[in-house]
Image (cartoon, rainbow, N blue to C red):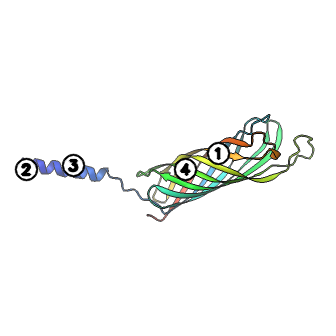
Amino acid sequence: MKSTIWMAALVAVAGTTMAQENVVTPKIEVGLNYSYSRVNPGGSLGSYNTNGGSGYVEYNFNKSLGLVADLGGNYAGTVNGVALNNTTFEYLFGPRFNFRHSRFTPYVQALFGGERYSNGLNPSATDPRLFTSQNNFAAAFGGGLDVALTNHIAVKPFQVEYLLTQISPQAMNTNFVQNNLRYSAGVVFRFGSK
């Protein structure tokens, strides 16, 4: 009887030990992403798509909390028959909350900063004859998932965010606040450990 109890206790301890995940928390993560945005300018100009890329650096304070610096740019050429040639460059910073598991790291983040907005000049057109650049407030709220391939490389199948931008009416924005959607996917390089 005692052997059976000891055997059951040993199996329980072994099962508990195996169930605990050995999660490595990197000190620094660097990501390179493809970026797609759905821009909603409001007014007579309908929503349009932009494509580009972004990169970020995350410093992890511990297993759950990191600080992110995200830099990215997108471009839109002709939109609904209008040659806008819009270029945006976002520079965003803020906390990321990670939920680390052995291979999967879902996360949520809240980033704040600015956006450098520029559009092209179409000299042959009378309206719109655009050519302006300005810095504006921007913020991104959302989350995503990283899937570890090794201790140093992960892939990001998705990151989806609500991207708020404020672009003044002089840039042909009739809504001032733009409620945009940003999707990203890419690769993550991990350095060091906590």
Q: Which of marks 2 and 1 is in front?
A: 1
Residue 164 vs residue 107, the one in the foreground: 164
Of the two numbered discs 1 and 3 on the same chain, state the one appearing first in sequence: 3
> In the image as oriented, which residue stretches furthest toward the bottom?
192
The Cα–Cα distance between marks 4 and 3, rounded to whole angstroms, is 38 Å
Image quadrant containing the C terminus: bottom left
- Direction from residue 126 to residue 185 in the image, left or right: left
Residue occupied by mark 4: 109
- Direction from residue 188 to residue 177 in the image, left or right: right
Residue 82 at x, y percent in the picture? 83, 39
Residue occupied by mark 3: 12
Q: What residue type is labelled 2?
A: Lys
- Direction from residue 82 to residue 56 in the image, left or right: left
Residue occupied by mark 1: 163
Q: What residue type is labelled 4?
A: Gln
Contact between marks 2 and 3 (CB within 8 A): the answer is: no
Of the two numbered discs 4 and 2 on the same chain, state the one appearing first in sequence: 2
The Cα–Cα distance between marks 2 and 1, rounded to whole angstroms, is 63 Å
Question: Residue shown at 75%/47% (left/top)?
Answer: 167
Secondary structure category for the residue under label 3: helix
> In the image as oriented, which residue stretches furthest toward the left?
1
Question: Residue shown at 80%/53% (left/top)?
Answer: 133
Residue occupied by mark 2: 2
Of the two numbered discs 2 and 1 on the same chain, state the one appearing first in sequence: 2
The Cα–Cα distance between marks 1 and 3, rounded to whole angstroms, is 48 Å
Residue 169 at x, y percent in the picture? 80, 44
Of the two numbered discs 2 and 3 on the same chain, state the one appearing first in sequence: 2
